[in-house]
Image (cartoon, helix red, strand yellow):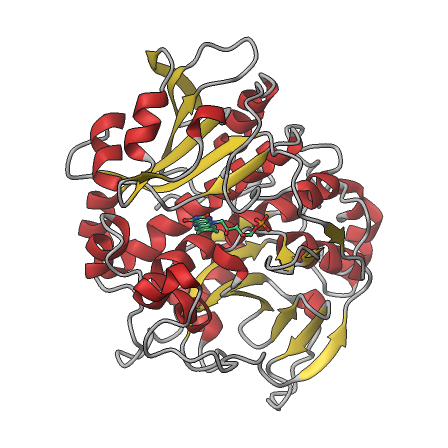
Amino acid sequence: MTERTTGAIEKTAEETERTTEVTERPPRSPAVIEPFPPALWADAVYSRKAIPPTLAAGHAAPGHSDAELDPLPPGHRLPLAPPPLHLVSSLGPSPAAHAGAARLGHQTGLGDPAVIAALLHYSYGLLHHDLSPGGWPLHRAVASARCRYPSELTLATLTTAFRFDPLHHQLIDLDRLMTDGQSREPAASRFAVISSRLARTAQLYGDYAPRLCAQEAGMLLGSVHLVATALGLRTRAGQDRDTLDALCAGRLPAAEHPMGYVEILPCADPPPAAPRRLPSDLATVLRARHSGAALFDPVPAPAPRALLADLGAALAEAPFPDFSCHLLVRRVADFAPGHYVHSGGRLWQVRDGDPLTLLEQIGQTEGRVSVNFRSTACTAYIAVRRGTAVSRYGADAFRRVHLTAGAAAHLICVAAARHGLSARVHNGYDAATAERLLGLAPDDETVVFQVAIGKARPGAAFRLPVVF
Ligand SMILES: Cc1cc2nc3c(=O)[nH]c(=O)nc-3n(C[C@H](O)[C@H](O)[C@H](O)COP(=O)(O)O)c2cc1C
């Protein structure tokens, strides 16, 4: 998969050397369990066979207990600075901060504790406490199926690793017991590493969990990349297996799987300005992001036309470009309803007219329409080249294409939030029908995300912002 660098500066020889140093670490041991068996495509994407019948009642999946499976790893805890209320690029490395950071050896722009706090909190922090009875109480910066949050975020180098604990807004030093004489400072981190604790989601979803976890890892990667860019950091998102394994070797608790990373590159001098397409205060937008009520039944109101311009700009800068986004537009002000495709930075129309029939044929779960498409503004389907990826990467294609698509899906959710709209990732769709009706390349392309967008009805939910 192609990977994009933000910050508009080419890799220096020094960076090439350092990245090579990471990739030349020994490959993973063959004993590592592969979490994404080829059967997942059939059982969790083309059908929902992997979902246990116990899910409907919210009970534990057979073979999985309710016991707490996964306390965070032990280690010395470091408090994080309070996250700033507003997220603006001036927080990132200013020329003076850059010079100071370089003097101290903090070359990635993470020398300011406020930048680390902002990066972690707005990428994956706890943002809302939902007090509605029977709801899921804790909501983070990224959507998660039934709020299980299987993804983990760690700031790392090859010799240091600091796990983010969003609940306490702290870091945990995972290598505290190592005595290699290296200094251990989060400020020296060069990678934000994403891993996944499948068991957390498998407690409810059983064998369907790997699909959700792969999707969510991608969404978290998109989130880290977005927030880092807004902070003026230079980044390169990565999927490379060997780099991941080198960064995670000996550090992850059993059954936690390395998924992806965002490399934080040395500061540019002068630092890059945050791209203009970002909202002027991304923090406010991220606090407004939500997935809507339990049943996605929005108000049938048109979305502003600027939503589509923002969606296009966000997708054009997604961390990995190898996807296309099919937009079925129903209600957008001054925009003709129809089927549009965004790919390679361009948007074009495939078909005009109300796409309701298409939506109701694709967006089905066991014969029932999944969300109220009659009142949505538009729905995005993210398609990836599954066939090409499988022939190139084998079983690892599953992780890779979901990272690519998940990162784009999060950007769609944030673009919706910018206009006060909710965006619902919903896996209740039929992948084979989507391929056929959206005209995807036979035996190659498939849809791995459905995201419905609409104006949320005022509901019973009562969410309080969390402030550390
Ligand atoms: C990968 C993924 C799959 C999801 N699938 C469904 C789904 O099939 N049905 C549904 O109602 N919600 C689904 N959701 C929505 C979540 O339940 C929702 O994100 C969660 O309640 C958190 O809400 P928040 O995003 O407002 O914080 C999914 C979310 C994710 C990230």
Q: Position of residue 100 (x, y in %)?
A: 82, 57
Compared to residue 417, the image places residue 75 above or below, namely below
- Please state which of residues 41 and 273 is positioned toward the viewer in this rendering: 41
Residue furthest toward the left? 443
Quadrant occupied by the C terminus: bottom right
Does residue 12 appear in this view? Answer: no
Q: How many marks?
A: 0
Where, by quadrant of the figure, is residue 212 drawn?
bottom left
Q: Position of residue 347 (x, y in %)?
A: 42, 19
- Residue 154, percent across and down? 58, 67
In this view, the residue in front, 291 or 400, is 291
- At horizontal 42% and vertical 69% (from top left) the residue drawn is 59
Residue sitting at x 72%, y 65%: 105
Q: Nearer the viewer, residue 442 or 272?
A: 442
Is 352 left, or right, of 148 in this rendering?
left
- Rendered view: 309 above or below 68: above
The reply to whether residue 285 is in sight is yes
Residue at the location (49% across, 27% down)?
A: 376
Query: What's the residue at 68%, 77% (across, down)?
Result: 184
Seen in the picture, residue 119 relative to 9 is either above or below; the reply is below
Q: Is residue 126 above or below residue 361?
A: below
Q: Is residue 427 left or right of residue 251?
A: left
Residue 32 at x, y = what percent? 31, 78
